[in-house]
Image: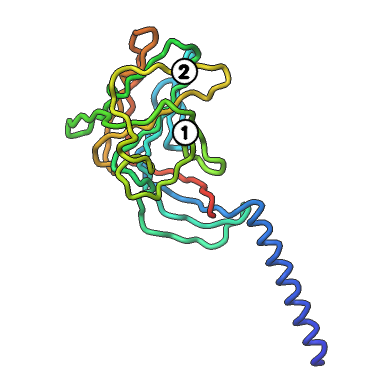
Amino acid sequence: MKLAVLTNARNAASYCTRYFVIICMGIQLAGCSAVVRSKVSVPDHNIQGASLTDADTINFNWPDMDLSIQAQNHQGSIGFVQLFLVPIIPVWSTDKKEQDSFYFTFWVNISPKDNTFTFDPGRVTLKFDDRTKVHVKKFIGPLEPYIGARSNWYGCGGRRYSGTSQRGIYGIAEEELKTPDGPISIPFSENSRGRCFLLGFDTNSSPDRSFILSIEGIEKKGLQYLIPEITFSKGADWDMLPVP
């Protein structure tokens, strides 16, 4: 009887060990991820000719240019952690600012179909309900855009992480940022995903504020390209992020 109990215990331990090894291998192969619900400024989805990626990124597709825009003021809580596609345990945290930035930052990706386009970041403004009008103070770009391999995060240039206390945009020090100084040529190539900019406004980035984004700085052959004004208001989005 004791031998049977001991044998069963050993078998159970063996099964547990094998199961644990399989889980570890799965984590190495597929990784874990966290589903995050973020408060964020979301664009009006009723603009003619526009489409949305999730709830927070607005896209325009014209015959001679594509344009994508996302407010970078996500404030999120972890919904649950999952392995493969199986939810494990719900975990909720308090609201946390996702970006390490002293600016209200916008991701703007411009993908022209020829080499006749320019962009002046200084002519992009935010207009708030109290009639305050704010211009871009600092920016980076034009750079190659990237999209996170396992999330809907957008960015410019090589992937950067926001683990710095330096004043700047996404870990980029203040002295590395550019100040708007007139039109910038937008490079064109057949296989390019466009050129992106991170535009920094020196104002409160709370998603509780409503405002209008006005982009007047895109020109084609020296003539202003008419971009509809976009109203942003408080909203929410879900995202899947990799867990190291």
What is the distance, in whole Å, between disc 1 and disc 2 at their CAs? Answer: 15 Å
Q: Is residue 81 above or below residue 206?
A: below
Q: Position of residue 49 (x, y in %)?
A: 44, 20
Name the residue: 18% across, 32% down.
132
The quadrant of the picture occupied by the C terminus is bottom right
Q: Residues within 10 Å of mark 1 (few under 14, many from 20)?
A: some
Q: Position of residue 13 (x, y in %)?
A: 73, 77
- Disc 2 marks a residue whose amino acid type is Pro
| 88 relative position to 168: left or right | right
Name the secondary structure under disc 2.
Answer: loop
Q: Nearer the viewer, residue 160 or 42?
A: 160
Mark 2 — residue? 187
Q: Nearer the viewer, residue 146 or 224?
A: 146
Q: Quadrant of residue 135?
A: top left
Name the residue: 53% across, 54% down.
243
Q: Position of residue 48 (x, y in %)?
A: 41, 21
Which comes sooner in the sequence, label 1 or label 2?
A: 1
Name the residue: 47% across, 55% down.
79
